[in-house]
Amino acid sequence: MKKIIVTALFIMSLVFASVNLLAQGAPPPPPDGHGGSTNQPASGGGGAPIGGGLGILLALGAAYGGGKIYKNWQQNKLEE
């Protein structure tokens, strides 16, 4: 009986939590003139460069892969 009560309370708490999650407002309207006759760029943001971060990630990946290859090569060299 206790297990049924605990399960029922758990399910009820999930139901009440989900009701609160659905309580968000509607999105704001688009700016004036947006999409009136042609496709216009979105206002704000959109100009973040990705070149520097991408180069850093590629360099770190190459260094990591090179280290793994070197370690594997050293291990095979010692086994022979």
Image (cartoon, grey):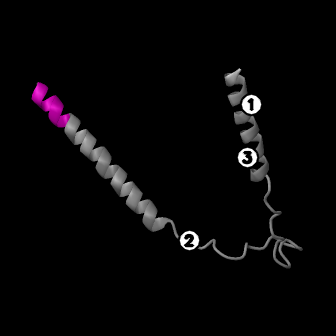
Q: Earlier in the sequence, mark 2 or mark 1?
A: 1
Q: Is residue 41 magenta?
A: no
Of badges 3 and 1, the one in the foreground is 1
Q: What type is the residue that disc 1 sits on?
A: Ala
Q: Position of residue 72 (x, y in %)?
A: 22, 35
Q: Which residue is mark 2?
A: 48
Residue found at x 80% / y 56%: 23
| Circle 3: element type | helix
Closer to us: 51 or 46: 46
Q: Earlier in the sequence, mark 3 or mark 1?
A: 1
Tag 3 near tag 2, CB within 8 Å: no
Q: Is residue 69 left or right of residue 10?
A: left
Residue found at x 83% / y 63%: 26
Residue found at x 76% / y 52%: 20
Q: Which residue is mark 1?
A: 8
Callout 1 crowding tier (Cα within 10 Å): few <14, some 14–19, many ≥20: few
Residue 17 circle label: 3
Q: What type is the residue that disc 2 sits on?
A: Ala
Q: Is residue 48 left or right of residue 80?
A: right
Q: Position of residue 34 (x, y in %)?
A: 83, 74
